[in-house]
Image (cartoon, helix red, strand yellow):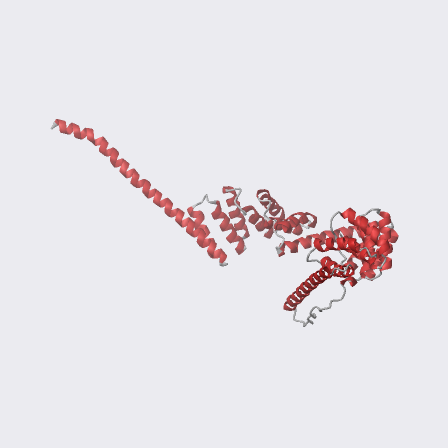
Amino acid sequence: MEQISTRIRCATPTVAVLLLSLLGAFTGTHAQAQVQTRENRVETNLRLGAEAMRSGKAEEAEKYFREVIQLAPQLAEGYLDLGLAQLKQGKLEDAVASLQTALQHNAKAPGASMFLGIAYFQMNHLDQARAALQQEMDLNPQNSEALMWLGITELAAGNPEKAVGPLDKAAELSPKDINILDYRGRAHLLVSKDSYARMYALDPNSWRMHRLSAQIYAESNQHKEAIREYQAAIKLAPKQADLYEELGDECRKDGALDVAATAYKNELELTPHNGVALYDLGSVLVDQGKAQDGVPLLKEAVQIFAKPTVADYYLGRGLADLGLYGEAVDHLEKAAAAGPESEMALHSYYKLSQVYRKMHRPVDARNALARFQELQAQRSKQGAQQLADWKKMNTATLETPASPSDSPSPPDKAPPRDKP
């Protein structure tokens, strides 16, 4: 009996340990289940809140996100989403507090600094908005939306010159974002106005002011007025080569080829061996039927450019006028290949069809003419589509352009004007 008691007493600690182990395992499983339940509730509320936000129900979303931060008070995502819901409702101070808490838990929370900056902007706290947006840019330099808001903030602060940089970069990252393009245009316009206002204050009768007036007229296709202003600028600054180039361009558009040639000649005298000046004068001489004078200038320009450009088209035309058909074909083919779908190609193929005929190459002539007609049909189709799009945007009745003719008029009457 005593042996049995001793065995029992010896066995008791082992039973107690087993019992405690079993109880501990049960308690751990229960705690784990509670954690799992809490995580599931957090995940569910984040999902429901996101769905409410997408449905435009920011107030409902806020309730879900509030439960998230109660269940997981260290979760930065919960405070971030809560801040967004509050921002959507215009609860700016609450949004700022929530977003700041999100950043305290995770300084790199994606977008948190940007939305904090937006909240500060809406509160007109521009210095704080700028600082928050800059923090976002430090974390994510490719965030075009943050760049846009940084530019908007600088515009609101009266600093358009500081807005240009971030808005230019935002436009580079998101070139089709119409909001970015809008604010970027405003910033550049304000900077331009400020620059010209300062110019006028410094010297209201300077040649630069005349050039500005000329450029404004030119953009409005008021060529005679632009010519007058360029001539006034040249009287005040006769050594400014670019004024002669711009004057020549406007004279050319106005059909005053003699005046254009004189302007380009002055440009070339001021900047000898300038490829663009050589092209300007050489091409207008070809337009005037003075290929003998224009071809040497265009040959030098082509050597300077070292790649096919519109200068090759004019050189080809000039060489053809001089009867040098083999050389003409070489340059016209280069011009056509340089821009297969361009206006330059259109004119080059038409001229090639004429030159091939004179060289007694009928197959090449037909192929060149066929390519010209194909390009002309494409351009007519594009023009018709643009007109149709225009009609959709306007209630006014517009006349539909005629179909391209089977016997097109020579395009040489309106040669390409692009600079090389």
Q: Position of residue 266 (x, y in %)?
A: 87, 51
Taking the image as shown, residue 387 lies to the left or right of residue 69, namely right
For the N terminus, the image quarter is top left
Which residue occupies the foreground of this view, 225 or 294?
294
Q: Position of residue 236 (x, y in %)?
A: 87, 52
| Residue 201 visible here | no
Q: Residue visible at 71% across and 69% down?
A: 406
Q: Residue visible at 35% across and 45% down?
A: 34
Number of callouts in the render?
0
Q: Position of residue 298 (x, y in %)?
A: 81, 51
Which residue occupies the foreground of this view, 398 or 210?
398
Q: Residue visible at 69% across and 56% down?
A: 340
Taking the image as shown, residue 90 lies to the left or right of residue 300, namely left
Q: Quadrant of residue 284?
A: bottom right
Q: Quadrant of residue 358?
A: bottom right
Q: Position of residue 251 (x, y in %)?
A: 83, 59
Instruction: Residue at the far front: name it.
Output: 360
| Residue 137 visible here | yes
Which residue occupies the foreground of this view, 240 or 159?
240
